[in-house]
Structures are given as C-alpha cells and as structure tokens.
Amino acid sequence: MYIGIPKEIKNNENRVAITPAGVLSLKTGGHEVIVEAGAGAGSGFTDEQYREAGATIVASAKEVWSQEMVMKVKEPLPEEYDYFYEGLILFTYLHLAAEPGLTKALIDKKVIGIAYETVQLPNGGLPLLTPMSEVAGRMASQIGAQFLEKSKGGKGVLLSGIPGVKRSKVTIIGGGVVGMNAAKIAIGLGANVTIIDLNPERLRELEDIFGTSINTIMSNPMNIADSIADSDLVIGAVLIPGARAPRLVTEEMVEAMTEGSVIVDVAIDQGGIFETVDRITTHDNPTYTKHGVLHYSVANMPGAVPRTSTIGLTNVTVPYALQIANKGYKQACLENGSLLKGINTIEGFVTYKAVAEAHGLEYDDVLGHLQ
Ligand SMILES: NC(=O)C1=CN([C@@H]2O[C@H](COP(=O)(O)OP(=O)(O)OC[C@H]3O[C@@H](n4cnc5c(N)ncnc54)[C@H](O)[C@@H]3O)[C@@H](O)[C@H]2O)C=CC1
Ligand SMILES: CC(=O)C(=O)O
C-alpha cells in the first residue's frame, strides 16, 4: 500500500504521524511511505533519517494526500478538505462529534475515516488515545500550576503551599487516563487533589492507586458545584467515546469560583465540559478570562511536547496501520473488532452512532459496507 504522511498545519502542532522507525516497519511489510518534506522537523526527525529508513520525501502536500492511505495526527483543517477523494483511507484523530464541517466533508467526498480516538479494545480501553491522554493529563497540572502564578494572570498561589500556608485545591472532573495522570502530577506538586467521576468502580480503583492522597467524589451537579467553588485549579477530563463532551460545569458554577482561579478543559477536543469554554485556544494564545477565571482550552496539548508525543503516538498507531496496509482496511477491520470501531465514515455514511447523534445525521451499520 502507498501511505502518505503530511506535515501537520495546525497552530504549533509539531507532532508527525510516523517516526523513521515506523517507516522502516511499514517498508519491511512491503509498503511505500511518502513523507512531506520537513514533516518530522518539529519532532526532531530529519528528512534524511526518513530517507534512510526507506521513505520517499516529496515537496508537495497534494502528492502526499493522493496516496491510498493518509496517516496524520490532528483532524484535517478546512484547507485540507480539498485533498479528500472517494476511497481515501484517512487514519488520524478526527473528533467528529465536535467537527460538523469535517464530518460533512468526509461524507461528501466518501472518505473512509478511521478515527484513532474510537478504536476500542474489548475492555473499553482506547489504545490510540491513551498515550496522548497521558501527555495531556500530565501537562494539565503543570500548565495549571503555571497559570496560577500572578504574572500569568492567576491568583498567585503555589500548588504545594508552604509550612504554615495551605495547599492549593485541584479538582479533576473525569478520572480516566487524563484524570489519573493529572492527579499524579498534581499530587507530586503537593496539591490537595479531588477526583470526580461517574463510575463508582473507577473511583474505587483510583482510591486503591492513590490512597488518602486524593479525595474521590461521585459526579453529580451538586458535588461538582461544591468542589469547584473553592478550587484553585479545575481540570476537565471527561469522555464518552466518540460523543460530544457533556456540559457538566455551568456558567453559574464558574461565576462562584474565586478570581484568578484556573480552568484547563482537556476535553475541549470533544467540545469541552465547561459552559464558559466557548472557543478552542492555541499554544500561541492559550488562555482567556471569563468571570475572573482563566480558561485554557487548547485542543492539541501534546503538540507542545512533540518529541515525547510523536514517539508515544506512533508506538501505538503503527501496528494498526500495518494491519490495514497488509490486509486492506476491509479485511483488517473484519478481523480486528477494535479497529472496526474506528470507522466513523465510509462511502458517504456515518457509521459511529455518537457522531450521527451529535449532528442529527442518519447512522448506518459499518458491516454493510465491508462485504
Ligand atoms: N486537549 C488535548 O490536547 C487532549 C484531549 N484529550 C481528551 O481528554 C478527554 C479525556 O480522555 P481520557 O482520559 O483518555 O478518557 P477516559 O475514557 O480514559 O476517561 C474519561 C472518564 O470520564 C468519566 N466520565 C464519563 N462521564 C462522566 C461524568 N458525567 N462525570 C464525571 N466523569 C465522567 C468516565 O467514567 C472516565 O473515567 C477526551 O476528550 C480526550 O480526547 C486527550 C488528549 C489530548
Ligand atoms: C487526542 C488529541 O486530540 C491530541 O492528541 O491532540
């Protein structure tokens, strides 16, 4: 199979969909990899390294996009929609429940859209989302600590406090991969950490992992309002796979927070969980203030640490890409139920229920398209 790797064009997105080691794996499998010149530079991989691994380097994005399968990191931006063609296999993060324009473009052009974030293991795990959630979760506490500094617009508190001065309070809503990793760093930085989740089993697991260094609370509107009212930092980390994120934190709850507090809405890529998060921000200009509270809502947080993130992402995506390339996407998905769940669009239809529901579109069973 011919596989194209474009240079990412989102603001400050320095990740790339493959490392030279990934190219070598695909080449060894008998496939051709066409990489856009400079695509790996932001992650510290040179064109020469890709060439040595067996890739062909081309200058034109159009040529990369004309291959049988395109592997990316972020969802395509509108300026990339013109490259879509019928039958293209697009393997990347798509986040379609929050992307009506992209959903329409994939349907209109009959692209086979396989979303990293909905590939799902039988135990519910999301293997192609997990490493980036680990990065974003760890970053969320680090970023929150930074924006709580006075010079960054925050209220001027140190997460750990000092002897004689109380520790700052961090509330994490959603105790999955992002939430657990945010907690690890927040605890390490000495904060007083509360995790809120809807799943009692998950709350039990978190208490088993962290013991008394966290408080666990059941998710409901009253508990969320109570916990965030006196929090210095609130992190949004909820996910219902494939669906638009539920708006769990109302404007009124944010108004009740004290001035200079910080919100980091990691779930922004699925639309965000705070009513007051009304925009996606960028690494260039990551925050805005509403009701005196700093809001951070960058949808590609791992893009800020591209070396770690590119290696972490390709560790997990390349084995799936090899299955698609070796067997063809139809056979690969029929043999691997986890990969099958990744297909969001095919032949002009939406085949992921939560995406169809988010946009009021008709849902079609993917199996009917794989015979
Ligand atoms: N902004 C960025 O750069 C990045 C964003 N993300 C996003 O972060 C979000 C979280 O991802 P993961 O932690 O991997 O998901 P996950 O599936 O591991 O965890 C989600 C958690 O939310 C909980 N949950 C569901 N409904 C809830 C409710 N009503 N109240 C409280 N908790 C609830 C679930 O029980 C689960 O524990 C996703 O939207 C993901 O795409 C991930 C990586 C980077
Ligand atoms: C998951 C995601 O949206 C990211 O890594 O940018």
Image: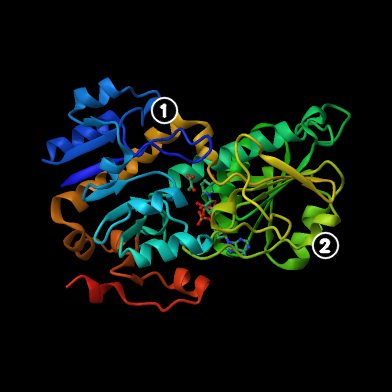
Determine the secondary structure under disc 2: helix
Q: Along the horizontal axis of the image, is 229 left or right of 349?
A: right
- The x and y percentages for residue 28 are 13, 36
Q: Up-down: is 10 above or below 357? A: above
Q: Position of residue 352 (x, y in %)?
A: 39, 69
Checking the image for residue 43, the label placed there is: 1
Q: Which mark is residue 252?
A: 2
- The kind of residue tagged 1 is Ser
Give the mark nearer the N terminus: 2 vs 1: 1
Which one is in front, 288 or 201?
Answer: 288
Left-right relation of 166 to 15: right
Q: Mark 2 touching mark 1, by CB under 8 A? A: no
Q: Which amino acid type is marked by label 2?
A: Glu
* Residue found 22% across the figure and 44% down from its top: 3
Query: Is 106 rendered above or below residue 176?
Result: below
**Residue under the point 48% across and 61% down:** 101
Q: Residue at x 68, y 56 (%)?
A: 278
Question: Is residue 224 in view from this perspective?
Answer: yes
Q: Residue 197: x, y in percent?
A: 62, 60
Q: Residues within 10 Å of mark 2 (few under 14, many from 20)?
A: few
